[in-house]
Image (tube, coloured by chain):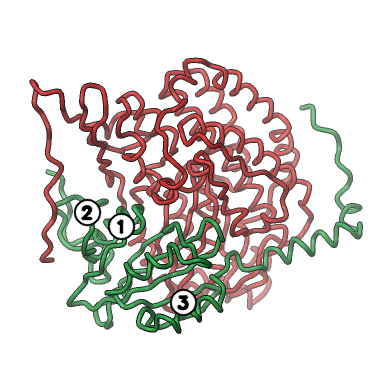
Amino acid sequence: MATTLPPQLEVVDQPLDTQMTLSFGPQHPSTHGVLRLELVLDGEMVVRCVPDIGYLHTGMEKLFEYKKYQQGIVITDRMDYLNPLGNNLAYCMAVEKLLGIEIPERAQVIRVLMCELQRIGSHMVWLGTHALDIGAMTVFFYCFRQREKILNLIEAASGERMTPSYFRIGGLMMDLPVGFERRCRQFADDFPEAVEEFHDLLSGNRIFQNRTKGVGIISAEDAIDWGLTGPSLRGSGVNLDIRRANPYSGYETYDFDVPVEHGGDVWSRYMVRMRELKESNKIIRQALDRLRPGPVKADAPKVVLPEREAMKTHMDALIHHFLIVAEGFNVPAGEVYHPIEGSKGELGVYIKSDGGPKPARVHVRGPSFINLSALPDMVEGETVADVVAVIGSIDIVLGEIDR
Amino acid sequence: MSGPAPTPAPDTQFLMSQDIERENEIAAGSRRPTYQAPPAELVAALRRERAEWFADAVEAFGELTLVVPRERIAEVCAHLKSAPGFEFDMLSDVTGVDRGPEEEPRFEVNYHLFSTKRYHRLRLKVLLDQEDVRVPSVVPVWRTANWHERETFDMFGVVFDGHPDLRRILLPDDWQGHALRKDFPLRGYEPYSLT
């Protein structure tokens, strides 16, 4: 390609002058993965911040084009590895939109239930690491204790803790195990108390407040212009939640509030997520109340794998099983973009199909990728120590940024 | 383990008439399209008024796609961002597509627009020939386009004219080729070494 690239960022290193360049990361623990920032500092103040990403790039979007539709689900698990069920949902719903499949009521409810559990789990990692970055060590252990309970629930349902692949095209991998509802209700009953514990540890803490209030401010207009979504946008006073704006999976029938804070700083983003924990818990309770016996897979024999028993006793089920596994299923040609509210913001999946069993193009709009692009706007003019607080507050996962 | 208060047996709840109504309401909700395109009459009016802006319009799977000639894209985006009734103040996503080396036009650039006020979405599509893979940048319209366009440049080699900082973003600066093009092999041309 005859393309002239602009020169790399010039390294400023003048010992007698006050400016210097600091390479922040990619091994620094508070960068939440392998993020590298080039910070130009004037004393302790950040003059310029240039994020450098791609250390975890594994070519997932390329890989999708070489895998059948149902094989793509396991790739999505590994993108935002703190919110794998959200990724599963976005991908499966995009394929279902192309196929025009309706999924049964019970599967819808279980999807909502599991996604909200996963949202709490993702927020637990955010809260623990965010507090740890700022210097509050105890919260980390309290959060991981709660997350462990959620991972156990996800493991009970799907067999995997981190990479569940529980949602399949046309429904679920399988129904919930016996006793899941009781365990999940137990968790939902205990969780509000845990949230109060986090508030006791952090929200009233003067050091935490001093480190977060008025730091990393971004206005509502700037946040929209930078494409911020999710809690990071709602912390700037914009009431936007994809679950409300473009409802999917029956979210419009659930009763929950969308927390909004108006400060636009680290503290506001913190409070939005803390309040979201309780709202997610509310949705979990409602979803548990709605669980009724029923099928969890759509009636689409050419797309959905048959039950094991049917496969052994019915010839047609065996044929369908063989064809789905060996050749995949054809998806009508066309293109769709399906957005959902992931734990970090708008998680959109764009799929272009050419009519075959493998997608022509899959693109994932990762909320972390976009939210990170607004980081320079938030940290320029702040101190180096505040950079750590701001990175924690936008809740990034490098697996999703680099894909 | 001390469980919560026992809940009523599910079967009796299921048979209650209000619950069945509720179930139907939920089922109807799940069938509704997840999002809307902007009002059809506004789109039709705009297409009549500015016929040179839109080469084609496709409606499929409940999504509206407008095909825009390459030179017009920045202009169209700037108009849609502020035009009453559209108000697409957020750019959700920009993504490239390679239709394959033998197709002409070979490349697509898709812009997914979203309105934080009206909650509707729209896709703009620009088609590019293989010989001249250039398109005006929309960074002056939305700053979020910066990284999206860098990613599209990195993966497809689409050059965005007027972009303030068009560098590779995910792959190393000395990478040869553009990885998401269909003629780029899955495992690359040779093992990549960082040394």
| Residue A63 falls in image quadrant | bottom left
Q: Colour of chain B?
A: green
Residue that appears at 21% across and 77% down: B130
Badge 2 marks a residue whose secondary structure is loop
Image coordinates of residue A150 in percent, x first then y, are: 60, 37
Badge 3 crowding class, 10 Å Cα cut-off, few under 14, some 14 to 19, many 20 or more, is some
| Quadrant that contains the N terminus of chain B | top right
Indicate whether A9 appears above or below A357: above
Disc 2 from disc 1: Cα separation? 8 Å
| Colour in which the image shows chain A | red
Q: Residues within 10 Å of mark 1 (few under 14, many from 20)?
A: some
- Identify the residue at image location x=39%, y=63%: A64
Residue at which label 3 appears: A334
Residue located beneath label 1 in the image: B139
Asked if disc 2 and disc 1 are in contact, CB closer than 8 Å, the reply is yes
Q: Residue at x 15, y 48 (%)?
A: B193
Residue B156 position (above or below residue A5)? below
Q: Where, quadrant-wise, is the C terminus of chain B in this rendering? A: top left
Q: Position of residue A384 (x, y in %)?
A: 30, 25
Q: Chain of mark 3?
A: A
Q: Residues within 10 Å of mark 2 (few under 14, many from 20)?
A: few
Instruction: Return the residue nearer the eye: A192 or A70.
Output: A192
Amino acid under disc 3: Gly
Compared to B9, does B46 lie above or below?
A: below
Q: Nearer the viewer, residue A288 or B43?
A: B43
Tell me which chain the residue with mark 1 is part of: B
Q: Which of label 1 and label 3 is nearer to you?
A: 1
Please state which amino acid type lies under the numbered disc 2.
Pro
Q: Which residue lies under the disc numbered 2?
A: B164
